[in-house]
Amino acid sequence: MSKRRIETEVIHGGAMPMILDSVSMPIFQSSTFAMHKESSYHDLKYIRLNNTPNQTVLAKRIALLEDGEAAVVTASGMAAISAVLLSTLRSGDHALALQGLYGGTHTFFSDELPGLGIEVDFVDGNNPKEWANKIKDNTKVFYAESITNPLLEVVDLEAITKFSRDRDLVSIIDNTFATPVFFKPLSIGFDVVVHSCTKYLNGHNDIVAGAIIANQELVQNSTAMLNHLGGSLDPHACFLLERGMKTLPLRLRQQSHNALALATFLEEQPQITKVHYPGLPTHPAHERAARLFGGFGGVLSFEIEGGAQVADELLDEVSIPTLAPSLGGVETLIVRPAASSHLGMSAKDRSAMGITDGLIRVALGIEATDDLLEDFAQALSKRGSVAA
Ligand SMILES: *Cc1c(COP(=O)(O)O)cnc(C)c1O
């Protein structure tokens, strides 16, 4: 049979054991399981060792969505990212990482890894000459993101995989923003995919979770590290994530539809000076995104005339979006990154990344498109003219 489409795989993929004729996967709320002469510590069936029924069924399904050989689910996106980095980098090693990474990942590289003897250089994702200048004999990893936050950049991902292959680096990509519905990084040569499943994969703003997808060996190494760090996902969260994933393609279709509609509307408004969304033909990497991705995702950001103060007034005036960090859920969320996701970063680092104090990020939910557009129009109309 030909390979099934992702809409079918999220419902039927993986080897879900039918237990007492149950159509959906029951929750195995048991921390420990009977032994059967296991010879390795990592094979003892125990929730922290990431091998109990809800964890393994879910991991199989996630591996399938990313066309990966294996996967492990983790207690959060940062648990996935820290476990994979700590298992691929040792004291004395060096990594290249994109500028403009997710704030938590950026500070993990800049604040935690140097204390363990691991160096990092942040590089421009569109400048292979700079990568060649910064690579060293001890460089082991190239770390990237499919779509960056909050400026929605899509860097030269194909050049990163080629560069990494040619120099034997492990290439790792955070695919949280694009999701496997729109992009499968392993198919263009990345070695490891990580996810914050907190976001689109779960999609309901009600758990934190993560995943690592790669070949057997890399997943085994990451799992051994995860087993020691203790970042395992509990069975109830596994159940919620597995349930949420079944509607991933449906949700994402509406979210990216809403994002394109709002981006197009905002771009026409005289008060809005800049809109960042890879689905807009004016986006600098629109052509690359259109070629690599099946869609452009559900997040956009924009700048409004008047800076932080006016931006905060707009956040007060919209009624559907909730002022909250995070993204990917069914509810539309809105934030000013300088006052939320990137608050942990110095103002100097922020402005070097292009994140101005007046930048607003919107993570679209699945509400009716026209209700969202009308809400933004009424909020903007309090400040001046609104183009239809
Ligand atoms: C949220 C997020 C993370 C961190 O995930 P948690 O589940 O909060 O630990 C990592 N990368 C990206 C791109 C994110 O959006």
Image (spheres, rainbow, N blue to C red):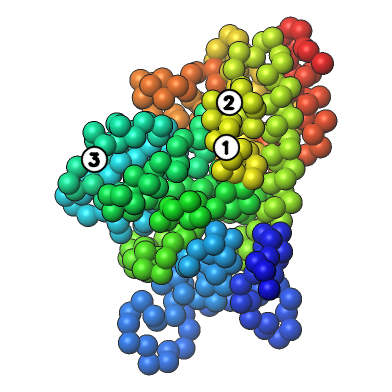
Q: Quadrant of the C terminus?
A: top right
Query: Percent x, y for residue 282?
Result: 61, 22
Residue matched to label 1 = 289
In-front residue for pair 66/160: 160
Q: Amino acid at mark 3?
A: Ile
Give me the residue at 52% from left, 38% from top. Answer: 147
Secondary element under disc 1, as helix, strand or loop, is helix
| Residue 298, picture quadrant | top right
**Mark 2 crowdedness (10 Å alpha carbons): few <14, some 14-19, many ≥20:** some
- Where 384 sits versus 82, above or below? above
Q: Residue at x 45, y 37 (%)?
A: 156
Nearer the observer, 280 or 219:
280
**Measuring 44% from the left and 80% from the top, which residue is drawn there?**
45
Q: Earlier in the sequence, mark 1 or mark 2?
A: 2
Question: Could you tell whether 268 is left or right of 191 in the image?
Answer: right
Quadrant location, the N terminus: bottom right
Tell me residue 132's x, y (percent): 26, 37
* Dot 2 or dot 3, earlier in sequence: 3
Report whether residue 115 is seen.
no
Expressed as whole percent of the image width and height from the top left, the position of residue 360 reads 58, 24
Q: Name which residue type carries label 2.
A: His
Which residue in the protein does label 3 denote? Answer: 135
Q: Which mark is residue 283?
A: 2
Give the crowd class for mark 1: few <14, some 14-19, many >=20 residues within 10 Å. many
Q: Amino acid at mark 1?
A: Ala
* Disc 1 C-beta below 8 A from ligand 1: no
Estimate the spatial distance between the alpha carbons at disc 2 and disc 3, rounded to whole Å: 29 Å
